[in-house]
């Protein structure tokens, strides 16, 4: 467990709005997912959650998702 109370690899952002829950991992443009991060995102997606990997170059997508 990390000091934030989550296990390693848990997504950076959890968003909740109007019946919608999404999980996002935030990375620098050249950032790579760790194995733990890939496992978390895969598991959440398998459970039906909206999951995203956001990088600065994804800004238009980020705006669409968060609208």
Image (spheres, helix red, strand yellow):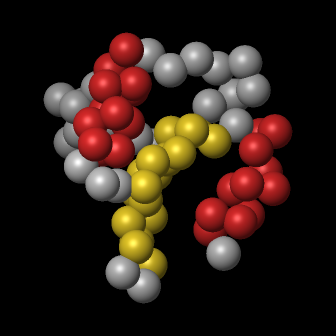
| 1 with respect to 63 (left or right) | left
Residue 50 vs residue 1, the one in the foreground: 50
| 8 with respect to 14 (left or right) | left
The quarter of the rendered structure image containing the C terminus is: bottom right
User: Is residue 36 at all visible to an observer of this figure?
Assistant: yes
Q: Residue at x 42, y 85 (%)?
A: 18
Q: Residue at x 34, y 55 (%)?
A: 49
Residue 28 figure quarter: top right
**Outermost residue to the bottom:** 18
Q: Residue at x 50, y 20 (%)?
A: 33
User: x, y percentage for residue 8?
Assistant: 29, 26
Task: Determine whether 19 is above or below 10 in the image.
Answer: below
User: Is residue 4 at all visible to an observer of this figure?
Assistant: no
User: x, y percentage for residue 65?
Assistant: 63, 63
User: x, y percentage for residue 64?
Assistant: 71, 66
Task: Determine whether 67 is above or below 12 in the image.
Answer: below
Query: How many numbered marks does the figure carry?
Result: 0
Q: Residue at x 34, y 33 (%)?
A: 42
Residue 53 vs residue 45, the one in the foreground: 45
Residue 39 figure quarter: top left
User: x, y percentage for residue 53?
Assistant: 57, 38
The quarter of the rendered structure image containing the N terminus is: top left
Task: Determine whether 31 is above or below 3 in the image.
Answer: above
Task: Determine whether 63 is above or below 49 in the image.
Answer: below
Residue 55 figure quarter: top right
């Amino acid at each position: 467990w990390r000091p934030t109370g989550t296990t390693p690899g848990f997504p950076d952002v959890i968003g909740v709005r109007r019946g919608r829950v999404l999980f996002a991992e935030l990375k620098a443009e050249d950032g790579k997912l760790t194995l733990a991060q890939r496992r978390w995102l895969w598991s959440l997606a398998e459970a039906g959650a909206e999951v995203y990997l956001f990088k600065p170059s994804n800004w238009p997508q980020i705006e669409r998702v968060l609208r």
